[in-house]
Image (cartoon, rainbow, N blue to C red):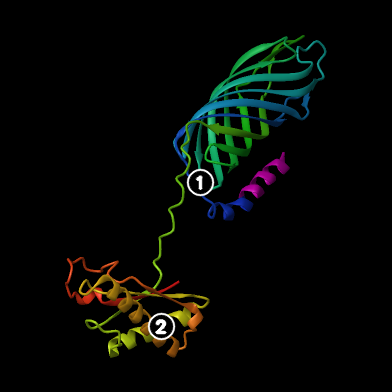
Amino acid sequence: MKMTKVFLAAATLAVLPLAAQAQINAQPGFYLGAGGGLAWGIGSNGNASTQTGFAVGGQIGYDFVGPRVEVEVGYGQLPTNVNIPGTAINNKVGQLTTMVNVLYDFMPTSTITPFVGAGAGVAFVDSNNSLGSTQFAYQAILGVAYNISESMRFQIQGRYMGTTNPSVNTPFGYTTFSNQNLLALAGVTWKFGVTPPPPPPAPPVVAPPSYMVFFDWDRSNLSAQALNTIKQAAQAFKTKGNARITATGHTDTSGSEQYNMALSLRRANAVKDALVREGVPATAITVIGRGEQGLLVQTGPNVREPQNRRVEIVIQ
């Protein structure tokens, strides 16, 4: 019995550091549970002695995420020897219990959840089906749960369970005996109607670094400001490593479509040559001419819009 207490305490202490790390999407809801384990009789009963027995049970309850309330039905049995000839107790004492438990989960959103609880109800105590005795029952609960998912949990727990003293028939008349037990149990619960956690948000789309170089009307030569922008683009390329550059040339809507396509390509090649002078390998640069396509500022035909006379440098 002492080893059971030590085991439960050690298990709780061992998992507490992990509880702060892993999290679940805890939700309120109804649940069903079932479990079983070992039982020991404690206390002094004169001529009676008990051995290790068993206990099983099932629960239906509601989880408020932290507090829980449940109704539990259980059955336990202890091998029992009584050194009084003619006594109704012979070989075993069993009891069927119906309890209402109130429990509290610490850190209910953690994967590892310690909990405590208490319960009260009735116990139907019998021995070899020859004696029935209805008693008030009570229990204290200490345990730790591993939340396998938002719906399912595995738990281990230790319990102290007692009843008011049942009576037993002996050759000397009815006598009462102490009915106190320690239980070590393991079991699972399943919660209904749990909504699966939402998927993690998609990572933000990060646009590749880009730079714009602008030109005078009908020109493809580079201004001082344009050269400074190209120098910044070359430095960003070197910092990124294992990258490529696309230089896309554009024009405004003045001039013919064919002329503007050729002009946009000359502008893109002028930017490429400047990037190469800044140390960017020519093989890492792709040149595209789009002419009047892809206007930065929408205009009608034959409009000399300065923002449309440009080369866009994109590093990928």
Q: Say which amino acid is labelled 1.
A: Ile
Residue type at mark 2 is: Lys
* Quadrant (top left/top right/bottom left/bottom right) for the C terminus: bottom left
Q: Could one spot residue 164 in this view of the protein?
A: yes
Mark carried by residue 85: none
Is 143 positioned to the left or the right of 61 in the image? right
Tell me the quarter of the picture where residue 311 sits: bottom left
Q: Residue at x 70, y 13 (%)?
A: 168
Pointer 2 residue: 272
SS at badge 2: helix
Seen at 53% across and 76% down, the residue is 242
x then y, percent, for residue 207: 39, 66
Instruction: Determine whether, in the image, residue 54 is placed left or right of residue 123.
Output: right
Please tell me whether residue 66 is drawn above or below residue 242 in the rendered image. above
- Name the dominant secondary structure of the magenta segment: helix
The residue lying toward the viewer, choosing from 11 and 276, is 276
Q: Nearer the viewer, mark 1 or mark 2?
A: 2
Q: Which residue is mark 1?
A: 24
Range drawn in magenta: 1-12
In the rendered image of this protein, does residue 296 appear above or below residue 121? below
If you read the primary sequence from the N terminus, does the residue marked by circle 1 or circle 2 appear first? 1
